[in-house]
Amino acid sequence: MGVRLIFPDSVAFTVELHLSTGQRYRVQVTLDLQERFLIVASGILPDIEDHIDDFVSQLSAIVSSQLAYLKWDGTSDLMTEYQLIRILPVYRLQRSFTRFDIVMDNAALIHVKELNNKITIQL
């Protein structure tokens, strides 16, 4: 499922980006839950700029599942809190990072088996 690091009010994990050109990247994603934004390295921007809507759509699903897995306590109770994270397709460059604002929907309970543990974005 990729490596996850936890910072205060933030979650960091890695996704794989597969491009139609055959290029593949491992991209670190950091989700700031308090300020409600997400950052990725700006080096991938030239490759995703023409596919930004697809990129944020697929990444939104991955981020939502990663956050739900993080909230699951790993016990025999297979229900966990799930919040749909929508990443807005507008971005800002900040130093060597690309910043996307996010919108978080209300939380609901979901069965862990229903979570998508995909970590690959295909463009």
Image (spheres, rainbow, N blue to C red):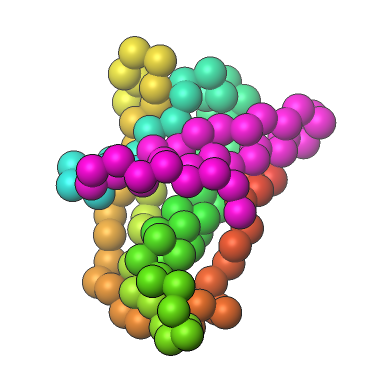
Residue 76 or residue 49, whichever sits in front: 76
Q: Position of residue 15 (x, y in %)?
A: 58, 42
Q: Quadrant of residue 101?
A: top left
Q: Nearer the viewer, residue 23 or 88?
A: 23
The residue positioned 69% from the left and 45% from the top of the image is 122
Q: Identify the residue at horizontal 56%, vertical 33% (top origin).
A: 27
- Would residue 94 appear left or right of 34 to someone viewing this image? right
Query: Which is nearer the eye, 99 or 9?
Result: 9
- In terms of secondary structure, what is the magenta stretch mainly? strand
Tell me which residue sits at (38%, 71%) in the image.
73
| Residue 67 shows in this picture | yes
Residue 101 vs 112, above or below: the answer is above
- On the image, the x and y values in percent for residue 81 come to 34, 74
Name of the residue lying farthest toward the bottom: 77
Q: Residue at x 32, y 26 (%)?
A: 92
114 up-or-down from 9: above or below: below
Q: Is residue 5 positioned above or below 77 on the image?
A: above
